[in-house]
Image (cartoon, rainbow, N blue to C red):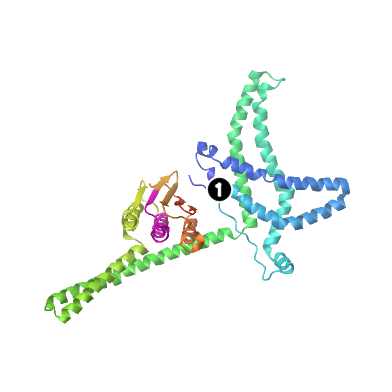
Amino acid sequence: MLTRTAMAAMTRRPLAFLGSSWPWRALAYLLCSAVYAVAMCLLIYTAYVFGTGTAFIAALLTLVVAALPVGAFERARMRLVDRTPAGDPHVRPPAPGLRAWLTTRVREQATWRDLGFTVVALSVLCWMDLGLVSSAFWLPVLLMSAPLQPSMHWVDGLPLAAGGLLLVPLSAYMLAAWAGTRAMIARAVLAPGDAEIIRSRARLVDAFEAERRRIERDLHDGAQQRLVSLSMKLGLARLDLPPGSPAETQVAEAHEEAKRVLAELRELIRGIHPQVLTDRGLGAAVEDVAGRSPVPVDVDVSLPGRLPPPIEAAAYYVVSEAMTNIAKHSGARHGHVYGRLHEGALVLEVRDDGVGGADPAAGSGLAGLADRVAVTDGVMSLSSPRGGPTLLRVEIPCPAPG
């Protein structure tokens, strides 16, 4: 199942959660707080050796110097329990130079949020993180070692050992719950604009999709019907003219041109939002795209039913854009499309045996696809080494069809 956060992972089946990497990721996330604990121990040692005044000055210097690195460290560390990258809220200085940089840092709110979080992380959070990890580890170990204690008969220690075994999975849930909560707090403080950016992007995509459908409907019901009528009238007019006459030749040319324009318009409407996707679903729409591809493409898309329209639309345009790239840029001789609904996620893979080297920054449309997939809370990965092959993989959270 595609999960983006430790909190979401906890909603999976117990065996699926405990057998996944999420408990270990949560443990690693919390153990990273040992860096803060070491810094605090050094400050305490400074106070013991050189006096409280020196330690206070050292603490102030530590906060000033470490605030920005701590913020960056926390945003990077967050990926262990939250796969969505945390954006850097710091603005770029308007001019080069140390003075401009310092002025920008002092004036922006993000710097002071980093500073405040550093104070809390050094004084409170690190001890809570490490204390929870210590409790989650040592308490089950001590209980499970009860039958081995010399002061206790091994039979009397068996219930305690059983309790220790039961605490192991509970500890995994406890660590994941606290790590997920702590990451949400860190994101709210250190990257407060991320949620609004995602919501804004979703609203833009919804508006774009609504406008796309309106254009499709207007073209289908308006321009296409008029072209059909014009083509029929030209065909009837052609029958009324003497064969081989100049007028008949010109009407015949106009008739053929009208049919070509009608075919192009139908292709345009199909590209805006294919009717087969609306009528028959994603599998049939992918088969339709593959059938029109100049590069032979095998399709292995098997779904248990219709998916929600936003997910079908996003998946269709991923496949359509990927096949366009295969035809235009890859030099491939063969392609393959795979699609399955697997444990709550739609998994799509598009492969080709081309020359590789696909780059989302090169204007091939891959960056736009990544944005579209991100709006659905999905992830897109690309493997395209020089010389090929190329593999585009998309995972979109999706409930099983009812």
The stretch drawn in magenta includes residue 361? no
What residue sits 87% from the left and 46% below the top? 49
Q: Residue furthest front?
A: 387
Q: Residue furthest bottom?
A: 246
Asked if one can make out residue 147 in the rendered structure from this viewpoint, the answer is: yes
Location of residue 206 in the rendering, given as x and y in whole percent from the top left corner = 45, 62
Q: Is residue 225 above or below residue 37?
A: below
Residue 57: quadrant of the picture: bottom right
Q: How many labels were placed on the picture? A: 1
User: In the figure, is residue 140 to the left or right of 20?
Assistant: right
User: In the figure, is residue 285 to the left or right of 23?
Assistant: left
User: In the figure, is residue 254 to the left or right of 288?
Assistant: left
What residue sits 67% from the left and 45% below the top? 32
Q: Residues within 10 Å of mark 1 (few under 14, many from 20)?
A: many
**Residue that carries the numbered disc 1 in the rendered image:** 5
Location of residue 294 in the rendering, given as x and y in whole percent from the top left corner = 33, 58
Asked if one can make out residue 378 in the rendered structure from this viewpoint, the answer is: no
Three-letter amino acid code of the residue under disc 1: Thr
Location of residue 286 in the rendering, given as x and y in whole percent from the top left corner = 35, 54
Circle 1 SS class: loop
* Residue bounds of the magenta highlight: 311-338
Location of residue 318 in the rendering, given as x and y in whole percent from the top left corner = 42, 57
Q: Main secondary structure of the magenta part?
A: helix
The stretch drawn in magenta includes residue 336? yes
Q: Who is closer to the viewer here, 133 or 299?
A: 299
